[in-house]
Image (cartoon, helix red, strand yellow):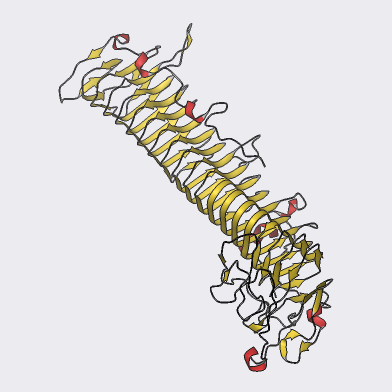
């Protein structure tokens, strides 16, 4: 899917947010008849339109209603406090015989240290408009501005506890060091728009807007935000942090929509819910960390284009594509993805990942036609359980060099794993499929051992080493030796199921298994493994005769590494070769339980709560575990 450029306004670049409306400097003192000159510390009462030209404390003494094409209160001095004491200032946006007028409720003209508090202002073209530094709006209701309720230029601007329903922009600020706390913008074209750095938004809610939050700047923090806008939150800048927030978009909207959209670097999202627009979360940038995310876009849950990306603890259960990522150094971990089986056959994909140095671990998927589809180099998939539904479904489709599948369980009604490219390692995995459990195509220099293949295997234009020299260790079936693979068929006629065990080692079959013409598993695992056999070291003495090979091999210690130097593959400690890379990687600890049953009877168990979605839609389909 093509990435969509994030813009602040439809047809307008992000930098154009403030370029709307009549600037405060275009108003002059002479435009208002009443001018107040007050240096007194005593409150000055305001009962009608007024120019404030001296510092002081001003109090709205009564409700004010004015219909003109001018401003009602003009602030032309610094160090001013306006206390509304709960009163209402009402203007008009249309004058009979004139039409729409650019009226302003409160105008601030290059004044600093101005406070507006406890006041209701409504029905102006701009409710509050102006410029200056150190401006505060506290406990105010700014309502029904035709273009903007609150529009300011300046630094150190704070908005606290405000209600801002509008026909245009709710809050539009250009400046640095902006704080907006406990503000509700309702029915606006844009709820909150800020151009500037050092921006903090806390407990800002934006129901029923086109754009909920739009920030163009660096060092932005959003805490406790909530939006049900078409575009929940949009950010363009660096050091963006979004915490404990919910951005839900109305489902089924025509055209582009998203919960959170970010273009920039050093992006952090923690405990964020985003959906159900076209895309839940969209990030274009580098150094991205997403954790504890629930993203349920109609099309894509999470869409990422960038480098140094870390996605952890994510739940997605409605998107046609769970996570779509493009770039380098991408880590996806702790993902729970499910898709309603009603739509099987439509090409739904759990993970669509393209790039280099990609690590996917602790992935739990169910209901997709394609669980993982990845293209690139140095791709690792580990500690994961995948349930593929659909008559043409595929669990893992990987094209590229340096692919590692470690401790992966795949259960598919059609195809299990497809690998195209050199230097693949498949270890400790349990793959079950009706058509092909493993399909190697144009793949060579592979190492594949200590796996369960429950179904046919197809090898085309490919070569692999299918075993290692037997050595002590817990294998994928729960036995006490690491060696080759278990070759099963659902009807019980698989090689490991019918071939007798070796007289010298009850965990290994008595004969080699020819996987493909001229390619053998010399040490196929016996199925089922004996439950009362002595340990391997007590029954068998293994030869240390080595065979030189260039295949990638894996060290079997608690914290093992895949290295990249040519070694003798069949030694007691195995280290191996990857001709495509000089990097090293560490195998994860096995969190996928080995098979520990004594018969080939298929048993189904649920993949956590993610299956509940599928069960509600049709028959429950569960991953086989043995």
Tell me: 284 left or right of 425: left
Total numbered circles: 0
Compared with residue 403, is residue 115 higher up or lower down, i.e. above or below?
above
User: Which quadrant of the figure has residue 84?
Assistant: top left
Tell me: 426 left or right of 232: right
Compared with residue 320, is residue 366 higher up or lower down, i.e. above or below?
below
Residue at image position (71%, 61%) is 422
Quarter containing the C terminus = bottom right
Of 563 and 151, the residue lying toward us: 563
Residue 204: x and y, percent? Answer: 43, 40
Compared with residue 163, is residue 458 higher up or lower down, i.e. above or below?
below
Of 626 and 436, the residue lying toward us: 436
Residue at image position (53%, 35%) is 208
Residue at image position (23%, 21%) is 45
Residue 544: x and y, percent? Answer: 66, 85
Q: Confirm whether residue 249 shows in the render.
A: no
Quarter containing the N terminus = top right
Of 95 and 554, the residue lying toward us: 554
Residue 510: x and y, percent? Answer: 78, 86
User: Which quadrant of the figure has residue 185?
Assistant: top left
Tell me: 232 left or right of 485: left
Of 502 and 297, the residue lying toward us: 502
Compared with residue 196, is residue 89 higher up or lower down, i.e. above or below?
above
Q: Confirm whether residue 19 shows in the render.
A: yes
User: Which quadrant of the figure has residue 76?
Assistant: top left
């Amino acid at each position: 899917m093509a990435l969509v450029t994030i813009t602040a306004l439809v047809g307008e670049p992000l930098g154009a947010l403030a370029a709307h409306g009549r600037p405060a400097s275009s108003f002059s003192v002479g435009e208002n008849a009443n001018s107040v000159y007050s240096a007194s510390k005593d409150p000055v009462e305001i009962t009608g339109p007024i120019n404030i030209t001296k510092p002081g404390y001003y109090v709205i003494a009564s409700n004010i209603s004015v219909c003109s094409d001018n401003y009602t209160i003009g602030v032309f001095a610094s160090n001013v406090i306006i206390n509304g004491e709960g009163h209402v200032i009402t203007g008009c946006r249309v004058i009979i015989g004139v039409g729409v007028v650019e009226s302003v409720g409160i105008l601030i003209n290059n004044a600093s240290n101005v406070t507006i508090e406890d006041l209701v202002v409504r029905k102006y073209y701009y409710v509050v408009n102006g410029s200056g530094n150190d401006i505060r709006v506290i406990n105010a209701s700014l309502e029904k501005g035709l273009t903007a309720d609150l529009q300011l230029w300046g630094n150190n601007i704070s908005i606290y506890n405000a209600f801002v329903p509008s026909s245009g922009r709710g809050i539009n600020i250009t400046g640095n060091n902006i704080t907006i706390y406990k503000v509700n913008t309702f029915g606006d074209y844009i709820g909150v728009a800020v151009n500037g750095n050092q921006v903090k938004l806390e407990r800002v809610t934006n129901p029923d807007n086109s754009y909920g939050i739009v920030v163009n700047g660096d060092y932005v923090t959003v805490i406790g935000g909530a939006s049900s806008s078409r575009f929940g939150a949009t950010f363009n800048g660096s050091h963006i942090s979004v915490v404990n927030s919910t951005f839900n978009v109305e489902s089924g909207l025509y055209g582009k929509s998203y919960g959170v959209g970010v273009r920039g670097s050093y992006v952090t999202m923690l405990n964020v819910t985003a959906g159900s627009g076209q895309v839940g979360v969209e990030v274009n940038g580098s150094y991205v960390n997403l954790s504890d995310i629930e993203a349920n876009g109609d099309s894509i849950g999470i869409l990422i284009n960038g480098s140094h990306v870390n996605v952890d603890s994510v739940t997605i259960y409605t998107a046609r594509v769970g996570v779509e990522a493009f770039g380098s150094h991408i880590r996806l971990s702790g993902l729970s993805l499910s898709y309603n089986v009603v739509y099987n056959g439509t090409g739904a994909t759990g993970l669509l990942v393209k790039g280099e140095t990609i690590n996917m671990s602790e992935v739990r998927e169910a209901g997709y036609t394609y669980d993982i589809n990845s293209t690139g180099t140095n791709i690792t998939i580990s500690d994961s359980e995948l349930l593929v539904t659909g008559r043409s479904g595929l669990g893992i489709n990987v094209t590229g060099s340096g692919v590692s599948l470690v401790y992966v369980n795949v259960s598919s009604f059609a195809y299990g794993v497809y690998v195209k490219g050199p230097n693949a390692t498949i270890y400790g995995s349990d793959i079950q499929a009706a058509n092909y459990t493993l399909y190697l195509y144009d793949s060579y220099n592979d190492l594949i051992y200590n796996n369960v293949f429950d179904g046919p295997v197809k090898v085309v234009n490919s070569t692999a080493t299918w075993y290692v020299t037997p050595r002590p260790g817990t294998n994928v079936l729960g036995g006490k030796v690491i060696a080759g693979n278990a070759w099963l068929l659902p009807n019980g006629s698989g090689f490991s199921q019918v071939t007798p065990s070796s007289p010298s080692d009850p965990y290994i079959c008595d004969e080699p298994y020819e996987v493909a013409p001229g390619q053998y598993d010399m040490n196929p695992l016996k199925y089922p493994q004996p439950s009362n056999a002595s340990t391997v070291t007590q029954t068998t003495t293994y030869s240390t005769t080595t065979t030189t090979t260039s295949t990638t091999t894996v060290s079997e210690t608690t914290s093992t590494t895949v290295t990249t130097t040519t070694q003798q593959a069949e030694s007691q400690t195995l280290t191996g070769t990857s001709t495509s890379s000089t990097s090293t990687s560490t195998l994860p600890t096995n969190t996928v339980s080995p098979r520990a049953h004594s018969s080939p009877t298929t048993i189904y168990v649920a993949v956590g709560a993610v299956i509940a979605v599928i069960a509600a839609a049709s028959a429950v389909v569960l991953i086989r575990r043995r």
